Amino acid sequence: MDTIIRQLRDKTNPERFRSVIALGEFGEEALGYLHASLDDEDKWVRYFSADVLGTIGHRSSVDPLIRKLLDEDQDVRWVSASSLGRIGDPRASHALMQAYHSDNAFVKIFIEEALGNLALAGEAVPAQVTAR
């Protein structure tokens, strides 16, 4: 894992996002590095960090992913919403609802999906958001 972390920190490496994907293989052991990578200046590092965190599915990732619902990049926002839906923690419901009412149509699709996943998990979600 040390080699992968060095590659991720090497700002001259144009494909640092690949290191994020590789970190996902370490599961919970890599959570701290993945959470930190959510704040990277490289959009693709943030994007793949959010995606990998959704795959790992650990509840400690909910708050960092909620913060990424406000990312400057719409791709990072939608993948963060998708990951929150995959994790399925009801703490994400309120933040997803707020993001839904303030984001573009593309991101809203993924927020609807995430809220639908929360509804399937038993979380109350307003019908006007999940119904199209």
Image (cartoon, rainbow, N blue to C red):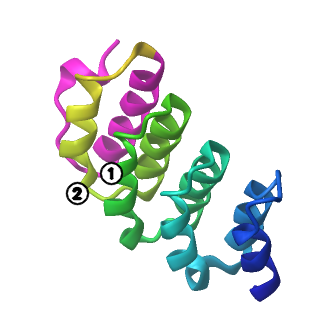
Question: From the image, which quarter does the C terminus lie in?
Answer: top left
Residue at point 72%, 78% (across, down): 5
Do tag 1 and tag 2 residues touch (Cβ < 8 Å)? yes
Residue at point 60%, 43% (across, down): 43
- Foreground of the two, 18 or 95: 18
Q: Nearer the viewer, mark 1 or mark 2?
A: 1
Question: What amino acid type should be assigned to the residue bearing mark 1?
Answer: Ile
Residue at point 63%, 48% (across, down): 42
> Can you tell which mark lies on residue 66?
1
Q: Which residue is mark 2?
A: 91
Disc 2 residue crowd, few under 14, some 14–19, many 20+, Cα 10 Å:
some
Q: Quadrant of residue 101?
A: top left
Q: List x then y, in percent, for residue 104.
A: 39, 17
Question: What amino acid type should be assigned to the residue bearing mark 2?
Answer: Arg
Whole-number angstrom distance, CA of label 1 to CA of label 2? 9 Å
Please, is residue 23 above or below residue 79 in the view? Answer: below
Instruction: Tell me where the magenta segment starts and ends, as one range.
Output: 106-132
